Image (cartoon, helix red, strand yellow):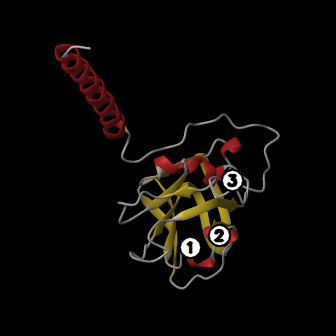
Amino acid sequence: MTSDSAVRLAYIAAATYGLALAFALAVVLARSPEPVTPAFDAVAECSRADLAHYCRGARARVSSFHAFGSHHPIYAIDGRSSEDLVEKWVSASNDAAPWIEVLFPEPVSFSTVRLSHAGTAEASDYTMRSYRLSCSAGAEVRGSLGIHSNEAPRPLHSLQCRNVDRLRVDFDIEPGTARDLVRLYEVEVVP
């Protein structure tokens, strides 16, 4: 192989590598800053016990998610309290104020919210201690509840919400600890 051929081959390899990096960067930058799960049509056989289940037409919208770990927000509304360490929503490492919203396809009324934190399948240190639940109809907040010292991996919270189109959970992360990311396995909303 001549030196001209080697140089040409090096240029081709560098250009190919540069194009691959540019494509990857474009994919990252094109992602929505607030990912939302797709809408599914409600299914008649779907359980009436969980209004947040995607089979009832609910969607999840989040401030961020850990894309490289495949921790998509759909796992938070799939109705499975799986102990599979992948099947959970995890906020991105650069998200200083993570949140998740359950968007209902039509107004609903409920009285109870259950969260399945990471402590259900992982070390209890990963369970979020501080967060706020709120329900709203459009911009009008119709109920809220602040939690400041949670230790339960599957807490059940009473929250009276009437004719609302969303439930939002805002989390307080603790940088430098196991709670520096949100790791949420499931959101259940009970009428």
User: Which badge, 3 or 2, is on the more N-terminal residue?
Assistant: 3
Task: Work out which quarter of the rendered image holds the C terminus and state it.
Answer: bottom right
Q: Which mark is residue 126?
A: 1
Q: What residue is drawn where x is 80% and y is 38%?
A: 44
Q: Residue at x 55, y 64 (%)?
A: 183
Camera-nearest label, 3 or 2:
2
* Dot 2 and dot 1 residues touching (CB under 8 Å): yes
- Which one is nearer the viewer's eye here, 181 or 57? 181
The residue sitting at 68% across, 49% down in the picture is 78
Horizontal side of residue 15 vs 113, given as left or right: left
Q: Nearer the viewer, mark 1 or mark 3?
A: 1
CB contact under 8 Å: marks 3 and 2: no
Q: Position of residue 127 (x, y in %)?
A: 58, 74
Q: CA distance from mark 3 to mark 2?
A: 26 Å
Label 3 sits on residue? 51
Q: Which mark is residue 52?
A: none
Is 173 left, or right, of 9 in this rendering?
right
Q: Circle 2 is placed at which residue position? A: 122
- Which residue ends up furthest to the left in the rendered image? 4
User: Could you tell which of marks 1 and 3 lies nearer the N-terminus?
Assistant: 3
Q: Position of residue 177 (x, y in %)?
A: 45, 77
> Of 86 and 51, which appears nearest the observer?
86
